[in-house]
């Protein structure tokens, strides 16, 4: 199992992000929301591309936003492998946007549990989709 996050797994192109927000479906597991959709075909990209968003409106200080971004990214990094394996080798990568909607006070363990639940739900959706 590979646990490191490569640059190819980051979702950073404006066109891909716009596609996700326009065409993506949402799954809610408070305090997190994940937006997911298959992205247009790309060369040499990863099977799953993701990004994390924490609203500036709720978290005024960048230190706080970065803390929640790091927590979400770490939980995703540790628990993403079953999702990647259920997707297989398909031409269209899966795009994910994790949005943190909660208030301050959620520790890493709470966020990790919610990430695991969301990733399992995504596995169920895309395992059926790719059979």
Image: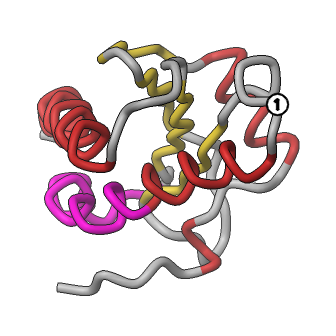
The stretch of residues the image draws in magenta is: 74-91
Based on the displayed image, in which of its 4 quarters is residue 118 positioned? top left
Taking depth in this image into account, of 125 and 106 the one nearest to the observer is: 106
Compared to residue 127, the image places residue 99 above or below, namely above
Q: Name the residue under label 1.
A: 60
Taking depth in this image into account, of 131 and 4 the one nearest to the observer is: 4
**Residue at x-position 17% and y-position 39%:** 113
- Image position, residue 108 (x, y; %): 31, 49
- Image position, residue 125 (x, y; %): 21, 27
Give the residue furthest to the front: 105
Q: Which colour scheme is used?
A: secondary structure
Label 1: element kind: loop
Compared to residue 125, the image places residue 50 above or below, namely below
**76 magenta-colored:** yes
Compared to residue 131, the image places residue 83 above or below, namely below
**110 magenta-colored:** no
Magenta portion: prevailing SS class: helix
Rendered-image quadrant of the C terminus: top left
- Image position, residue 67 (x, y; %): 58, 53
Taking depth in this image into account, of 3 and 58 the one nearest to the observer is: 58
Q: Can residue 130 be seen in this view?
A: no
Rendered-image quadrant of the N terminus: bottom left
């Amino acid at each position: 199992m590979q646990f490191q996050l490569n640059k190819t797994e980051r979702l950073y192109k404006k066109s891909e992000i716009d596609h996700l927000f326009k065409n993506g479906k949402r799954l809610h597991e408070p305090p997190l929301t994940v937006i997911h959709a298959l992205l247009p075909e790309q060369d040499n990209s990863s099977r799953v591309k993701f990004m994390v968003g924490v609203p500036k409106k709720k978290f005024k200080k960048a230190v706080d936003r970065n803390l929640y971004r790091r927590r979400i990214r770490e939980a995703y990094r540790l628990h993403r492998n079953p999702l990647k394996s259920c997707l297989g080798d398909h031409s269209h990568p899966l795009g994910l946007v994790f949005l943190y909607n909660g208030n301050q006070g959620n520790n890493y363990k709470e966020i990790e549990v919610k990430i695991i639940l969301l990733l399992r739900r995504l596995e169920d959706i895309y395992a059926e989709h790719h059979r």
